[in-house]
Image (cartoon, rainbow, N blue to C red):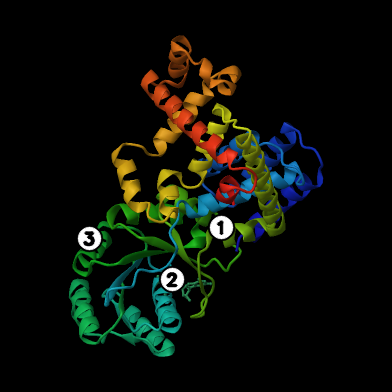
Amino acid sequence: MFESLSDRLGGVFDRLTKQGALSEDDVKTALREVRVALLEADVSLPVARDFIKAVQDKASGQSVTKSVTPGQQVVKIVHDELVHVLAGDGGDGKLKIDNPPAPILMVGLQGSGKTTTTAKLAKRMKEREGKKVLMASLDVNRPAAMEQLQILGVQIGVDTLPIVKGEDPVQIAKRAKTQASMGGYDVYMLDTAGRLSIDEELMQQVEAVRDVANPRETLLVVDGLTGQDAVHTAENFDERIGISGVVLTRMDGDGRGGAALSMRAVTGKPIRFVGLGEKMDAIEEFHAERVAGRILGMGDIVSLVEKAQETIEAEQAERMMKRFQKGRFNMNDMKMQLEQMLKMGGMEGMMGMMPGMKKMSKQVEEAGFDDSVLKRQIALIQSMTKKERANPQILQASRKKRIAAGAGLEVRELNQLIKMHRQMADMMKKMGKMGKGGALKQAMK
Ligand code: GDP
């Protein structure tokens, strides 16, 4: 999986990390090579373009960290961006199979590996989670398809719904549901018919089945070797049927891997599993971190940079604490605090971390104080001059007007910020007075 892409990127970054100092041109050249490598891996053009832009923005906005080279920092940024592209925002990959019997709808084109994947997943749920699984083939067009699933079922020791000639897919789906309920099954999987290409009849059939089964998961199986076609297929199925995730098959070959990289960005749907061969065990959960690591093959550098960044944050906290002890808390400190809050998951994330804060977070929300407020406050501070940030007490009406206008906001919001700053400064002063090793040091740990 991803071998050629990995080789290409490896070459680029080897050169980059060996250099001590990097010019902007070095980074530009490297990123141009990364872009070509992505396109050669059949990553779609807009995804590759956005990827490079995101890396460029982050690289130029980052201060140079001691103890790692700029090249190493670039590797880390590329790694993080890869994880982002692969995973989007979360999703833990686990199938939703609570509330038995949970229906799982399997959809996809013919030959994508749908039947094989159905059996692989059934085996996994049975062996790893001790689930009782029933599989049913709804492929009435190809009698051999039903038998194929039955044979796989016997092979892996998972029940299949008995074949009844002459039923339509909706009738089979209903029978599977009844059988699953009566037979005490945890999960029943519906393996729908495939077609060579997407057509209206296929979509209508799948829709009808979806409507009676009301699936907990609708997994689209696509052939990873087909690159961008796989992504288009996913877009189409998602539009018509609504899918909850994608299984990419044939990732064991030396495919170019582009489908995996474009899938989430283009369709918004996560890749949940990858098929890695014809055998019944040849399937893996898809983990963005792991895959990004595999693509870059530079795990050591990534963790090295993470450590260095943690050290810097600790140093920063220490410096701030010293300032507070002296009773200093200006708008620069305030900005750093606000940014820290955003980084820790914003208001919601911070409140969620503190016990007993759930109720308060609701009040905060009702008062209209959310992450956008944090961002606006940061924007206001950014529109202050150096002198104003260091001495907020000089903020008089004309300055306020200019600052608010600069941030595209109203003076009212700036007044709120100033009030909040004053309250925080008072609090910091009090905490600072408690001395070294006092409450503040505890709070910072
Ligand atoms: P369906 O028509 O979508 O149900 O496709 P099948 O499940 O019948 O699979 C078609 C062929 O692809 C079979 O020969 C499978 O063994 C093979 N296949 C399925 N998944 C994978 C995979 O992840 N890797 C490889 N190498 N072959 C696979």
Residue furthest to the front: 434
Q: Which mark is residue 257?
A: 1
Q: Give the left or right position of residue 238, taking residue 292 as reference.
A: left
- In this rendering, the answer to whether 373 lies above or below 230 is above
Amino acid beneath label 3: Gln
Nearer mark to the viewer, of 1 and 3: 1
- In this rendering, the answer to whether 342 lies above or below 105 is above
- Residue under numbered circle 2: 113
Q: Whole-Å distance between the Cαs marked 1 and 2? A: 17 Å
| CB contact under 8 Å: marks 1 and 3 | no
Amino acid beneath label 1: Gly
**Residue at 68% in and 43% down:** 315
Q: Position of residue 80 (x, y in %)?
A: 59, 50
Which quadrant holds residue 363?
top left
Residue 37 appears in the picture as rendered = no
Amino acid beneath label 2: Gly
Which quadrant holds residue 290?
bottom right
Q: Earlier in the sequence, mark 1 or mark 3?
A: 3
- Residue under numbered circle 3: 204
Q: Give the left or right position of residue 307, taking residue 265 as reference.
A: right
